Amino acid sequence: MARRATKIVATLGPASSDPALLEQMIRAGVNVVRLNFSHGTAQDHIDRAATVRAAAQRAGREVAIMADLQGPKIRVGKFAEGKVTLEGGMKFVLDGSRTELGDNMGVGLDYKELPRDVKAGDTLLLNDGLIVMTVDSVKGEQVRCTVKVGGVLSNNKGINKQGGGLTAPALTAKDMEDIRTAMSFQADYVAVSFPKNATDMEMARQLCNVAASDYGHRPGLIAKIERAEAIPNLEAICRASDGIMVARGDLAIEVGNAAVPALQKRMIRMARELDKVVITATHMMESMITNPVPTRAEVSDVANAVLDGTDAVMTSAETASGKFPLETIIEMANICSEAEKAEDVKLDADFTGMTFGRIDQSIAMGALFTAYHLGCKAIVALTDSGSTPLWMSRHRIHIPIYALTPKLETQRKMALYRNVRPLLMDQSAERDMALRDAEAHLKKRGVLSSGDIYAITCGEPMGAPGGTNMLKICRAA
């Protein structure tokens, strides 16, 4: 398998729940498995997490598990026939008080606040923007609309308001319950849907930390950027999170398709500058739900995300319910590897004008600079928390970073960091012994051969978190 810096997040679903197939997908390049809490019961997720852990063990790899919360259900209710066909010019009522099933005149709402969030003249986009309605008036609980762009509207399809402005809270009662479920199997990351500001993320972190405290666990938090309101608050949301997801589906509906590519580049750049991870998601390999090969446009899309500097690219329906889950991962891994070969390394420019307030951060940057100019075979970081490899991974360098940690939780979390290969290794309390063990560990894996030069960082005394204070350049024995 080609060496690849960009990580792959694969959504698990009916198409990929077979343990043997999942093991093949992990071998083919899956680094993080996403469990989508919009579908399935708590027990389904607990069982799937166990399947993932077992498949990873058989494949001899550690993968991270990301629990993706559903967030507020801003959706229409159900129809008597399961769906209706709407045509341009038709009148249609979205009715918060309606209890009977919908028809081609109107439908009830799962989201009861809609009549208070919209006014005459607003544009509503339903079913991922495929159906467009204009609000004529709001009477009590009824939002009376005219269909501008028709199509088939089926049960529980989503509603977006153009330009944003729906008041639904980012965390619902279901999300709070789902956080408890996710912490019971120690999900490594929790993705929060529809956060509007940093407060939403801070609240999610408190809930996660309380639910995880029984297990001595602390998950990483990923903010899914999918609301127009999140854009002005992007930096604050990013700072309050461990990473962000460029969730291009809902975001495109609210801000318009054309605005998304530039936003994607801006978000990836911001995340890297703030030492956060970033995942690019939605429609990356959409045609592979039904086709064994991607379109040229999809290949370009994935490659561009890699060239933008994303930590990870993500699949949704392609691996959850598509016909070719394994092929999707193989194609994605190949595209990432090829795109990385074309990357420019501008390491010296990255450091111009940078100041480091922390010793461990200075050591991380010193290791990158020295390894780059010396042409080292590898950069090795002995790490407890994973901070040093995270800082190193924010800069482009074509030298692999091997992060050796005694903590399984840290190893799994680092599975999402670009260009970082996390390995589990018990660390001696004695520095020289730990350095010898690290070299032996990497020689055994075929990473280092006798005579190879590599850079290694660690902290003295060993095992003190945040204590990386030493950089050594070694020649393998």
Image: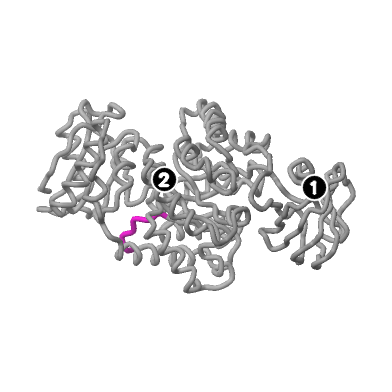
Residue at 24 percent across and 50 percent down: it is 349
**In the rendered view, would you say 154 is above or below 456?**
below
Give the secondary structure at mark 2.
Answer: helix
In this orientation, which residue lies closer to the viewer: 206 or 62?
206
- Relative to 441, is 143 on the left or the right? right
Amino acid type at circle 1 is: Leu
- The magenta stretch spans residue 242: no
Figure quadrant of residue 210: top right
Residue at mark 1 = 109
Magenta-highlighted residues: 1-7
Q: Position of residue 439 (x, y in %)?
A: 18, 44
- Relative to 227, is 435 on the left or the right? left
Residue at 38 percent across and 38 percent down: it is 410
Asked if the residues shown at circle 2 and circle 1 are in contact, with their CB atoms under 8 angstroms apart, the answer is no
Picture quarter with the N terminus: bottom left
Residue at mark 2 = 271
Give the secondary structure at mark 1.
Answer: loop
